[in-house]
Amino acid sequence: MMLVLIVQVSAKQMKESIKRIYEMLDSVSPLDFNCGSLCGEVCCVYDDGEDINSNLVLYLLPGEELMYEDSEHFDLYVIDPRQLDYPRKWKDDVFIVECRNPPHCDRSIRPIQCRTFPLIPHISEDGKLHLILDENEFPYVCPIVRDNIHLNEDFVKVTYEVWSMLVGNPMVHALISFDSRRRDNRRKGYTVVV
Ligand code: SF4
Ligand code: SF4
């Protein structure tokens, strides 16, 4: 009985902290206008038209899955991390969501990945957190990245604050470090924003 109570409280606290992060990011946008008007919201609707496996899915961070229970706008899936190119340290299930009707969704619960895009967290070899732009990470062209459009400063600041909090979770830190080492080894280049 006690164990059940602890798990429930922990899930509730987790959901509250995700909600707080969503609220922080709700107050900012990449540009001072709707950047979707530049590209037809390609980061929501990209479809290469051939391979069903290329449908855009969004990888959730730990706890985010709690936001999608019973949502009409998203399909939630769970994957064993051993089936993914994930760090060995990551033992928990990985959750992904697929939007049912992009670019329309319940924006109040869109994932962190959507809210902080096109900035990508990167941890340098000396352990410092950065935010970068990297056109090699996605299969479509984001005009902000292509044209190096100046991002709203509050967006960069709040996004940095949020990722600084998120990498406090050892699983998230391991994942971002894993991706960062692979990115550096790839030697294709990226732009460091902060
Ligand atoms: S983040 Fe980039 S790809 Fe997405 S809507 Fe804005 S400009 Fe388009
Ligand atoms: S969750 Fe919303 S913002 Fe994110 S890709 Fe889907 S439709 Fe776009």
Image: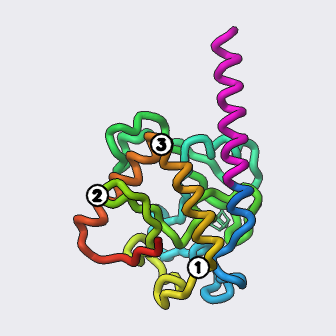
- Which residues make up the magenta segment? 1-21
Q: Of marks 2 and 1, which one's residue comes earlier in the chain? A: 1
Residue 62: percent from the left, percent from the top?
Answer: 55, 42
Mark 3 residue element: strand
Asked if the magenta segment contains residue 106, the reply would be no
Q: Of marks 3 and 2, which one's residue comes earlier in the chain? A: 3
Q: Is residue 102 above or below residue 147?
A: above
Q: Which kind of residue does numbered mark 3 sit on?
A: Ile
Asked if the magenta segment contains residue 20, the reply would be yes
Q: Residue at x 70, y 17 (%)?
A: 5
Q: Quadrant of residue 14?
A: top right
Q: Is residue 61 above or below residue 139?
A: above
Q: Nearer the viewer, residue 125 or 62?
A: 125
Q: Which kind of residue does numbered mark 2 sit on?
A: Glu
Q: Which one is in front in this view, the residue at disc 2 or the one at disc 1?
A: 2
Query: Viewed as shown, does residue 167 lie left or right of 174?
Result: right
Q: Is residue 5 above or below residue 182?
A: above
Q: Which residue bears the numbered disc 3?
A: 79
Is the distance from the Cβ of mark 1 to the nearest ligand 1 atom less than 8 Å? yes
Q: Residues within 10 Å of mark 1 (few under 14, many from 20)?
A: some
Q: Which mark identifies residue 42?
A: 1
Q: Residue at x 56, y 69 (%)?
A: 117
Q: Is residue 23 visible?
A: yes
Residue 75: percent from the left, percent from the top?
Answer: 65, 51
Q: Residue at x 44, y 41 (%)?
A: 171
